[in-house]
Image: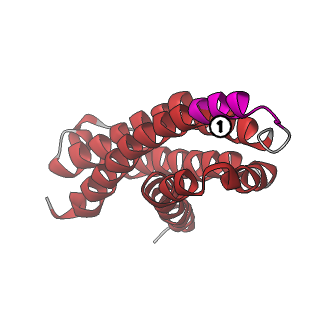
């Protein structure tokens, strides 16, 4: 097997697995735990932002997508119609499309909502007015809910994409 194909598959699969893992963990486990923690979640959100969590997730996704597109281009002889019209080509391109839609939702909905919630959470400790604090918590809760809802959509899209790609060879 050609070294370029091996490298592209390695990048695509490893970074794709990391992306899907985070995409499942965040909306189904992390966000509900943060919501239960209430104001105590602020420092955690701040720590995640300082560590660049959203940039790392975007890098996982971007690396997987780029490697996947290059891999599909190589194995399809430049997106040749014979391969792309085959069952395998259709399954792989469907998985790619689902991944791209998931990436778009993640970047347009999930990332901004979670980053804004994290920024607002960091300021909670300094608030002295209970009414301001309650209003801020309501805003943070709405942002987290929006991020989690978008994140769940992304997770399901990525699971469908991974499923299509996993079985593509056998169709």
7 sits to left or right of 161: right
Quadrant of residue 128 within the rendered picture: top right
Which residue is most to the bottom?
Answer: 1
Identify whether 113 is placed above or below 2: above
Question: Quick check: can you spot residue 22?
Answer: yes
63 sits to left or right of 125: left
53 sits to left or right of 38: right
**Magenta span contains residue 134:** yes
Count of labels in the image: 1
**Looking at the figure, which quarter contains the C terminus?**
bottom left
Q: State the SS at label 1.
A: helix
Question: Dominant secondary structure of the magenta stretch?
Answer: helix
Residue nearest the viewer, comparing 112 with 130: 130
Residue nearest the viewer, comparing 68 with 103: 103
Q: Position of residue 37 (x, y in %)?
A: 59, 57
Which residue is most to the front?
Answer: 130
Which residue is most to the right?
Answer: 126
Question: Quick check: can you spot residue 110?
Answer: no
**Magenta span contains residue 4:** no
**Looking at the figure, which quarter contains the N terminus?**
bottom left
The structure's colour scheme is secondary structure
Quadrant of residue 162 within the rendered picture: bottom left
Identify whether 168 is placed above or below 157: below
- Looking at the rendering, the stretch of residues picked out in magenta corresponds to 127-139
Q: Position of residue 164 (x, y in %)?
A: 25, 53
Q: Which residue is mark 1?
A: 117
Image point 75% across, 48% down: which residue?
A: 49
Residue nearest the viewer, comparing 68 with 46: 46
Q: Position of residue 35 (x, y in %)?
A: 53, 50
Q: Position of residue 98 (x, y in %)?
A: 34, 40
């Amino acid at each position: 097997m050609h070294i370029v194909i091996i490298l592209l598959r390695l990048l695509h699969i490893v970074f794709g697995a990391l992306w899907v893992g985070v995409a499942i963990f965040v909306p189904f486990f992390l966000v509900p735990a943060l919501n239960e923690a209430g104001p105590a979640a602020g420092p955690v959100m701040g720590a995640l932002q300082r560590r660049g969590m959203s940039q790392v997730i975007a890098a996982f996704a971007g690396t997987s997508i780029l490697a996947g597109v290059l891999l599909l281009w190589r194995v399809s002889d430049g997106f040749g119609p014979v391969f792309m019209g085959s069952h395998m080509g259709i399954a792989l391109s469907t998985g790619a499309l689902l991944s791209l839609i998931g990436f778009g939702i993640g970047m347009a909905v999930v990332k901004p909502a979670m980053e804004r919630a994290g920024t607002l959470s960091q300021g909670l400790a300094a608030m002295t007015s209970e009414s301001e604090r309650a209003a801020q918590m309501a805003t943070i809760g709405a942002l987290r809910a929006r991020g989690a809802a978008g994140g769940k959509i992304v997770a399901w899209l990525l699971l469908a994409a991974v499923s299509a790609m996993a079985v593509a060879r056998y169709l």
